[in-house]
Image (spheres, rainbow, N blue to C red):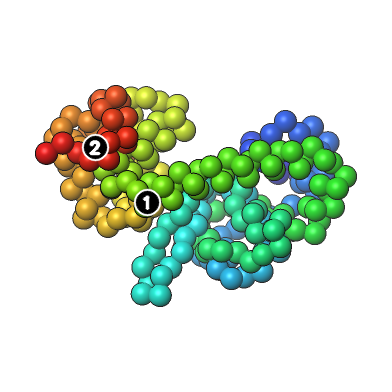
Amino acid sequence: MKKISRILSITPLFKGLSEQELDEIGSITIDRHYKRGESIFMEGEEANGFYIVADGQVKIFKTSMEGKEQILHIYGPGNPFGEVPVFSGSRFPANAQALVKSHILFLPRNSFVRLIAEHPSLSMNMLGELSMRLRQFTIQIENLSLKEVPSRLASYLIYLAREQDNSEHVTLAISKGQLASLLGTIPETLSRIFAKMSTQGLIRVEGKALYLLDPPGLEDLAAAGKLAE
């Protein structure tokens, strides 16, 4: 129980809750384990609860009629997912799959709703988190629809630098193929852009490590949208 409470305490949804409140949430939480590539839920399934990544990595994605995959989000430890449809009473709008062997916490909808009724502070936390998710999703839609791929990549690297609290280099936690899908492009195009950004002195790529050689230049690229010829 204490291990689950510790995991819950790093989840944005439950930030600032008391130890007693975390223990109460832990009491309704169900441990689940998934193998790499295993489905967690499918688009259209009833949203009877939501999930939190305790360990591992999960991708949220949609698949077109032609079988093309578009990654919407990739979540690591501490991140909740699937919570919006649970509280709107709808079905899951996308698919969730474990990218690696993952430990996932499942919170049943009915039990959690009863806890919210008893602890209004939970509602405030969730409103803040869901508002932030909506803002991130709006930015993602804007990037995919209005910006070209170099700008999307620059924006993503800036986001990683802030998330990893390191302005000099970042580590990719996903494959470049998955990154291409997340950015709405194909691996070949992404590889060409990486090469051109390296040639222009913006970044240096060493495996999964990316060194940000010119942060102001990346900021300009994120705003301007195109690499210099």
Q: Position of residue 196 (x, y in %)?
A: 16, 40
Q: What kind of residue is marked 1?
A: Leu
* Quadrant of the image containing the N terminus: top right
Q: Is residue 65 above or below residue 27?
A: below
Q: Residue at x 66, y 38 (%)?
A: 128
In this rendering, the answer to whether 15 lies above or below 98 is: above
Q: Can you say which quadrant of the picture contains the C terminus?
A: top left
Residue at coordinates 34% horizontally, 55% vertically from top-left? 184
- From where the camera sits, is residue 68 visible? yes
- Asked whether residue 3 appears in the rendered view, the answer is no
> Which residue matches tag 2?
205
Horizontal and vertical percent position of residue 48: 71, 64
Residue 126 at what x, y percent from top left?
69, 43
N-term-proximal mark, 1 vs 2: 1
Check disc 1 and report the residue beneath it: 144
Extreme residue in the right direction: 118
| Closer mark to the observer between disc 1 and disc 2 | 1
